[in-house]
Amino acid sequence: MALSWSDVDRPDFAPYIGRLELETKTTARCKHLTPMERDQNSPNGNRMDLQSLESQVDELIHTCEQLSDENRALRDQQSTLVAERASLIEKSELARSRVEAMIARLKAMEIGT
């Protein structure tokens, strides 16, 4: 499978774990390594892979906790803002009805004079 160097950084390239052999300056070919070949190439590979995976999982857990806290805070803030909006709408309607009543009284007074 011929790939350009720009393909190497694509997320969907990640499943092609293995060694890249340079064919030309602009293309590469992926050779899939067997688990035995990977172990032969890096004697501490499994331990380092496990440590790396553990570190990534810890980071993911930390990120999930942060996002959960932020989500909870945003939901609380949204609830407060919705209640405040309802209160402001109610006050606005009350003010509107008072202004309309005042206008009606002024018109009645104008007609009466």
Image (cartoon, rainbow, N blue to C red):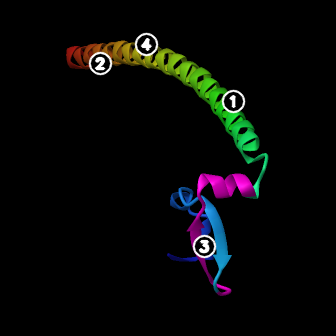
Query: Mark 2 — residue?
Result: 100
Three-letter residue code for mark 4: Ser
Boundaries of the magenta span: 24-40
The CA span between labels 1 and 3 is: 30 Å
The CA span between labels 1 and 4 is: 44 Å
Say if 66 sits above or below 91 in the image. Answer: below
Residue shown at 75% from the left, 39% from the top? 47
Q: Of 71 and 55, which appears nearest the observer? A: 55
Query: Mark 1 — residue?
Result: 58
The earlier-in-sequence mark between 2 and 4 is 4
Query: Mark 3 — residue?
Result: 6
How many C-alpha atoms fall within 10 Å of the one at disc 1: few (<14), some, or many (≥20)?
few
Disc 2 + disc 4, Cβ < 8 Å: no
Three-letter residue code for mark 1: Asp
Say if 8 sits above or below 56 in the image. Answer: below
The CA span between labels 3 and 2 is: 68 Å
Three-letter residue code for mark 3: Ser
Disc 1 + disc 3, Cβ < 8 Å: no
The earlier-in-sequence mark between 4 and 3 is 3
Quadrant of residue 95 within the rendered picture: top left
Q: Of 79 and 65, which appears nearest the observer? A: 65
Q: Position of residue 108 (x, y in %)?
A: 22, 15
